[in-house]
Each structure stands twice: as C-alpha cells, then as structure tokens.
C-alpha cells in the first residue's frame, strides 16, 4: 500500500516535471519572440542576430517549435490516469502552442511576403506606403495575442517571471503604438496611404467603403455611411420603409398613412468625427407632392413633416443638413403655391432652418434631384456645380448620426416621395 502510494507520488512528480519542461520551452520561445519584436534599439545577443537574419530565425523557431510539439506529445501520453488538473493544464499548453504557432506564422507572413522587417512592427507608419496598413493590423493582432498569451501563461504556471513581464510590457507597448495610429475612417487611411484608391477597406473589426477620388470638390478620404441603390437587386428598403415598384423600378417610401408622416433611417458613424458631408439622393414624385405648400403640418418645425420630400439632418435635436423637395408641378400653377421655391414665379416660403440648403425638382418623368433633364422653370434649381451631390461643411466637427427621412403632409394616396438611391459620405 505504502509503496504504491509512493510510486504514484513519484509518477505525479515526474509528470509535473515534464509539464514544467514544457512551460520552460514555451518561455524560451516567448523570450525569442520578445527578442524578435523588440528588434532595433536595445537588441542583444542571440535575438539581435536573429532579427538581422530571418533564415536563421526561421530555423531556430522551427527547432524550438518541434521540441515543443514533442514535449506536448509526451505530456499527452502521460495524461493517461492522471489528475484532472494536469489534464486541464495539458489542454491549455496545447492551445497555447497553437496560438504561438499562429503568431509566428503571422510574423513570417508579414516579414516574408511584404519584405517588412520585424522591427517595422514597432516603427509602423513612419513612411507613407501600402505596407503600413498591414503592419498596423499585424501589430494590433500581435499585441492582442501576446496579451492573451501572458494571461494564459500566468494562469497555467501561476508565476510572474521576468519573461512573462517582459512580453506583457511589449504587448502593452504594441497596443499603445497601434492605438495612437488608430485607423477608423477613410481619412485616416488616406493620411497613412495617400495613394489609396476607392473601394472597400478591411479594418479588422469592420469593412468600410472609401471614396478616394474627388467628391464635392474635395479630394479623397470620404467614408461612406449610407448607401442604397434599388436598381441593385441585392439592396432592400431600410426598416420602416415601404417598397414600391413603379414602371419596373424599385423605390422606398412611407408606410401606409392617411395623413402627415415621416419614415426615418439613421446612419451611425462608429465614432468617426466629421465636419463635411457629401451625398446624393434620387427620388420620385408619386401622385401630387407640393413642396412646402402648407396643408396640415407646421412647415417651420424640423421634427414635423415640413416638406414633401427628403430631409437629411444630423444628431438629436435634429440639425438641418439638406432638404430634397418634390413637387408634381412642371409649370407655374395656382399662382405658384405648389412650385419649387427656386422656380421663378413661385410663392412658397422656405423654412428658415433650410435656407438655401435644398434641391427641388418637379414632375415624374425623370428622377428627382439628379440635376439632369431639369425643366425650363427649374434652371435656377439645377445650377449648383455639385449636382447631383449636395455638400455641407460645418465649423465644428461632430460624431453625430445622420438621419434621412421621407416626409409628406398628406395621405399616401395623395402624395409620397419614395427614393430609389441615396449615398452619403462624411469626412
Ligand atoms: C543567415 O544564417 C544562415 C545560417 O546560419 C547563413 O547561411 C546565412 O548566410 C545568414 N545570412 C546572412 C544575411 O547573414
Ligand atoms: C500566411 O499567408 C498565406 C498566403 O498568403 C495564407 O494562406 C496564410 O493563411 C497566412 N497565415 C496567417 C497565419 O496569416
Ligand atoms: C514601405 O515602408 C516600409 C516600412 O516603413 C519600408 O521598409 C519600405 O522600403 C517602404 N517601401 C517603399 C516602396 O517605400
Ligand atoms: C485567448 O486564449 C484562450 C485560451 O487559450 C482562447 O480560447 C482564446 O481564443 C484566445 N483569445 C484570443 C483573442 O486570442
Ligand atoms: C485566467 O484566469 C482568470 C481566473 O480564472 C480568468 O478570469 C481569465 O480570463 C484567465 N485568462 C485567460 C487569458 O484565459
Ligand atoms: C496562484 O497563487 C496564489 C498564491 O500562492 C493563490 O492564491 C492562487 O489561487 C493561485 N492561482 C492559481 C490559478 O493557481
Ligand atoms: C450590388 O450591391 C452589392 C452589395 O452592396 C455589391 O457588392 C454589388 O457589387 C452591387 N452590384 C452592382 C452591379 O453594383
């Protein structure tokens, strides 16, 4: 009995020992990694040499990795009839090995595929070129992995040795550096990579669409926050909008209503700060919208359906950005009470909060507000050099959401102004 107990204890100690060997190798590997990442400045001994010679580095890492795998297998074998605690730790070592392998893979992908040296990870973005984004992303990923790894090592070995502290410090430094170079917006991307082209950019946590060409008289760095193109079969009306099909074309308008109403879509900017908005909207005059003609609603209240058309505002309380006005009229009628305020001879009053920040078109023969095929009475309405875009520049920057509302002050069967397209950029 006593003898068996003793054997068991010895056996357990051996297994434990083997576990510590594994942890030891892991520590060496991490030390190597620490050396690699540190690079440049205070590099010393082997790690400095390794940074300079990536062939040598690869060979060393492969060797350590193989040893680690071997140890891992041995622990696996010893797992038979072992304590659950050890089994759990063995699992954790397995996971850690995988994590570490992935981290190493990523480093080599960056260093080999793009010829970025590992110390570039710490010197990210000092120069403007297309490797910067990738470096930044790798830096962030690596910082995250290292942080997680230190947590795991601490949990397994319950010790705070120097290597763990070092690697934790490196992770913190990497995080600090990459967060001071936070890429949130297309403007950030343009600043880092001036030669970036229009298209989608993967920021890791989300994908954004950037217009890097000239828009609204301003070159590049525009982040798209709203986009609907109902001629594209994969696009659907936003929640709260009703789908119309008119003449084979799809539109989004107000839901059923027997009176004045607005339907709204909000576009959040994910913390992007902006002071410029550039956008466009195309709509359709269904039945008989009549611009600012006062029928039921207070036309001076930005929260009411002050227009037959589309209202674009930012934030809460709403601040006016642009108003797209629709009228069914194609010539001056009834003394101009139903016509565009920009048509000569009209007698409409524009709400003071709108001022000159509006577009207006009439009729249903061609899309509204595209600046094309304007009627003779609409010459002044279609004179903006920005058309079909609207452009606003504010004195102070904001992170407000942008809201688009389709509004009319009469029942659906009398009037609606559904939209077929919108596209809004900020910077
Ligand atoms: C890197 O190390 C390998 C193996 O020791 C060696 O063959 C190679 O010449 C070294 N390369 C450089 C650039 O020092
Ligand atoms: C490394 O790059 C290769 C090819 O570009 C890719 O298949 C692989 O998934 C990458 N590995 C990691 C860990 O990113
Ligand atoms: C891009 O930047 C990296 C790191 O900053 C640098 O090593 C590389 O030479 C640069 N490439 C070009 C084409 O400027
Ligand atoms: C952190 O480590 C745990 C345990 O190994 C793993 O399940 C998790 O996916 C890791 N998280 C990240 C972000 O790497
Ligand atoms: C380490 O253990 C603590 C306490 O059990 C847990 O909260 C934490 O998430 C663990 N860390 C990792 C990286 O697994
Ligand atoms: C780590 O050690 C401390 C003090 O020795 C102990 O209180 C704690 O429970 C240990 N944690 C783990 C995860 O073993
Ligand atoms: C339709 O919209 C989808 C999603 O926005 C986009 O990926 C696709 O390129 C669009 N198709 C056309 C023909 O524009």
Image (cartoon, helix red, strand yellow):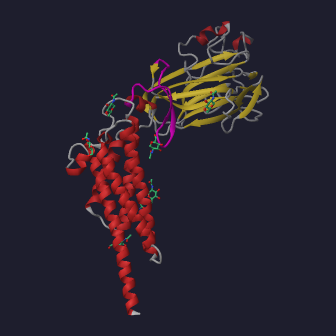
Span highlighted in magenta in the image? 192-217
x 68%, y 9%: residue: 375
Q: Is residue 239 above or below residue 302?
A: below
Examine the image and state in which quarter residue 190 appears.
top left
Q: 302 left or right of 145?
A: right
Percent position of residue 129, x then y: 36, 29
Q: Residue furthest top?
A: 376
Nearer to me, 56 or 200: 56
Percent position of residue 133, x then y: 40, 36
Does residue 208 belong to the magenta stretch? yes
Q: Is residue 182 visible?
A: no
Q: Is residue 196 visible?
A: yes
Q: Quadrant of ligand 7?
A: top right
Q: Is residue 225 above or below residue 47?
A: above
Percent position of residue 128, x then y: 34, 29
Q: Residue furthest bottom?
A: 1
Examine the image and state in which quarter residue 360 appears.
top right
x 36%, y 53%: residue: 146
* Label tally: 0
Q: 26 left or right of 266?
A: left
Percent position of residue 416, x then y: 73, 27
Give the quarter of the figure containing the N terminus. Answer: bottom left
Q: Residue furthest right?
A: 413
Q: 358 left or right of 339?
A: left
x 44%, y 60%: residue: 95
Q: 41 left or right of 349?
A: left
Nearer to me, 171 or 109: 109
Does residue 76 belong to the magenta stretch? no
Nearer to me, 40 or 323: 40
């Amino acid at each position: 009995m006593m003898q068996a107990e003793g054997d068991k204890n010895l056996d357990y100690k051996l297994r434990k020992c083997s576990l510590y060997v594994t942890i030891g190798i892991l520590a060496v590997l991490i030390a190597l990694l620490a050396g690699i990442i540190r690079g440049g400045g205070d590099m010393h001994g082997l790690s400095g040499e390794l940074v300079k010679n990536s062939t040598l580095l690869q060979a060393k890492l492969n060797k350590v990795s193989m040893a680690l795998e071997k140890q891992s297998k041995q622990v696996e074998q010893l797992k038979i009839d072992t304590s659950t605690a050890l089994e759990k730790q063995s699992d954790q070592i397995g996971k850690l090995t995988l994590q570490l392998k992935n981290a190493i893979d990523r480093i080599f992908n960056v260093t080999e595929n793009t010829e970025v040296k590992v110390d570039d990870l710490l010197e990210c973005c000092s120069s403007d070129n297309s490797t910067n984004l990738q470096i930044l992303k790798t830096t962030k990923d690596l910082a995250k992995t290292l942080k997680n790894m230190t947590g795991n090592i601490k949990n397994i070995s319950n010790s705070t040795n120097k290597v763990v502290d070092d690697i934790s410090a490196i992770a913190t430094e990497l995080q600090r550096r990459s967060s001071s170079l936070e890429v949130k917006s297309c403007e950030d991307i343009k600043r880092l990579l001036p030669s970036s082209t229009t298209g989608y950019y993967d920021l890791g946590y989300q994908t954004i669409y950037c217009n890097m060409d000239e828009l609204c008289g301003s070159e590049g760095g525009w982040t798209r926050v709203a986009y609907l193109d109902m001629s594209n079969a994969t696009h659907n009306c936003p929640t709260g909008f009703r789908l119309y099909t008119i003449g084979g074309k799809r539109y989004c308008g107000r839901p059923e209503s027997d009176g004045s109403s607005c339907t709204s879509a909000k576009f959040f900017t994910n913390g992007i700060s902006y002071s410029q908005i550039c956008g466009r909207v195309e709509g359709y005059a269904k039945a008989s919208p009549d611009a600012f003609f006062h029928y039921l609603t207070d036309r001076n209240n930005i929260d009411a359906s002050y227009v037959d058309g589309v209202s674009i505002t930012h934030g809460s309380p709403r601040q006016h950005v642009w108003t797209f006005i629709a009228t069914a009229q194609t010539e001056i009628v009834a003394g101009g009470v139903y016509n565009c305020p920009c048509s000569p001879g009209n007698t409409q009053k524009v709400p003071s909060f709108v001022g000159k920040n509006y577009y207006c078109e009439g009729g249903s023969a061609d899309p509204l507000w595209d600046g094309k095929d304007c009627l003779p009475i609409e010459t002044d309405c279609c004179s903006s050099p920005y058309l079909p875009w609207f452009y606003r520049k504010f004195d102070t920057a904001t992170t407000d959401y942008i809201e688009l509302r389709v509004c009319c002050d009469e029942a659906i069967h009398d009037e609606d102004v559904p939209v077929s397209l919108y596209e809004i950029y900020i910077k």
